[in-house]
Image (cartoon, rainbow, N blue to C red):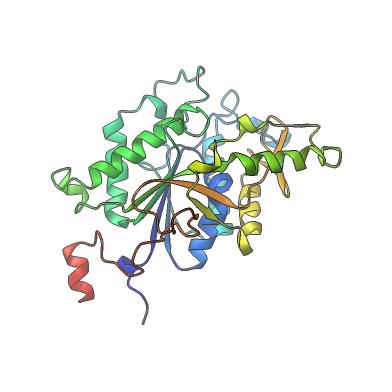
Amino acid sequence: MTEQPARRRRLLLVHAHPDDESINNGTTMARYAAEGAHVTLVTCTLGEEGEVIPAELAHLTPDRENTLGPHRIGELDRAMKELGVTDHRFLGGPGRYRDSGMMGLATNEAGFWSADLDEAAAELVAVIREVRPQVLVTYDENGGYGHPDHIKAHRVALRAADLAAERAFRRDLGEAHTIAKIYYNRVPRSVAEERFAALRGELGRLPWAEAAVIGDVPGVVDDAAVTTKIAAGPYAAAKAAAMRAHATQVEVVEPWFALSNNLAQPLFADEYYELVRGESGAAAGQLEDDLFAGLAPQEEQGMSGAQREEQA
């Protein structure tokens, strides 16, 4: 018998721009999609303020045609096909919130950074109550590296998680739902150091003359803060392919890549997380190897009354 959608594993990821999901969570998304989980990606902006790597696409930039946003919708579509993810959405619909640009340059009053927090969170509450995820993945309070849209995505994700659980909040958006586990994207410092050391020995064979530094990698923390590791296994190729799909933003030469700054950095095929809400499913002193660890495989947590009746 086919498993009912309400009883499947359900993973929600909240990201600021197209390409963030593939760089941070491509392995994770590909794994859970392949395992039959319902994977939902919510992207908060179109990334309209991004730089463009290929010279033949330079006309897309905001100071010329200003059509980078629509182009990146297509890149995201292609990336999701590589990962096997079919449920990807833009917060409030495509173009509802515009890319704010980097901190200190975020002058666009219509940018996501300037959006009303509860208004933006309500858009995400609707998704949470519809999808009813057991697990949410997003950035830490610094957005991983300080980008205003990443910080705002963190704030919106956590505010929405709280509001979605409140029965009295916006009943028109669906029945209340509590997310069991919330994770931040992380990279253990020891892993970053090891990979950057290997990268320095490869620079002469790569198209980039210089390497980034560990401080350029979002979410690097002391190893002790990391609670969960999703091993690349057979999904490393899907992650690299998804990153390549974001061709305006990313150039990949496995197992390395560079953004528009032409600074090489490691492609982290293994992905790491910090559990910040919920109970770990790992033994003391061990890392989880599954974001759903500790959750009953067919638990009815958060299911609506109608869904329970349907499955009775």
Q: Residue furthest front?
A: 284
Estimate the x, y position of residue 13 in percent, counting from the top left. Answer: 43, 48
Left or right: 177 in relation to 59: left
Quadrant of the frame with the N terminus: bottom left
**Is residue 37 in view from this perspective?**
yes
**In terms of depth relative to the viewer, which is nearer, 121 or 236?**
236
Left or right: 88 in relation to 190: left
Q: Residue furthest right?
A: 204
**In terms of depth relative to the viewer, which is nearer, 64 or 132?**
132
Left or right: 153 in relation to 287: left
> Which residue lies at the image location 35% right of the left edge and 53% below the top edge?
279
Quadrant of the frame with the C terminus: bottom left
**In terms of depth relative to the viewer, which is nearer, 191 or 16?**
191
Estimate the x, y position of residue 76 in percent, counting from the top left. Answer: 54, 48
**Is residue 98 in view from this perspective?**
no
Q: Is residue 115 above or below residue 45?
A: above
**In terms of depth relative to the viewer, which is nearer, 130 or 140?**
140
Q: Quadrant of residue 108?
A: top left
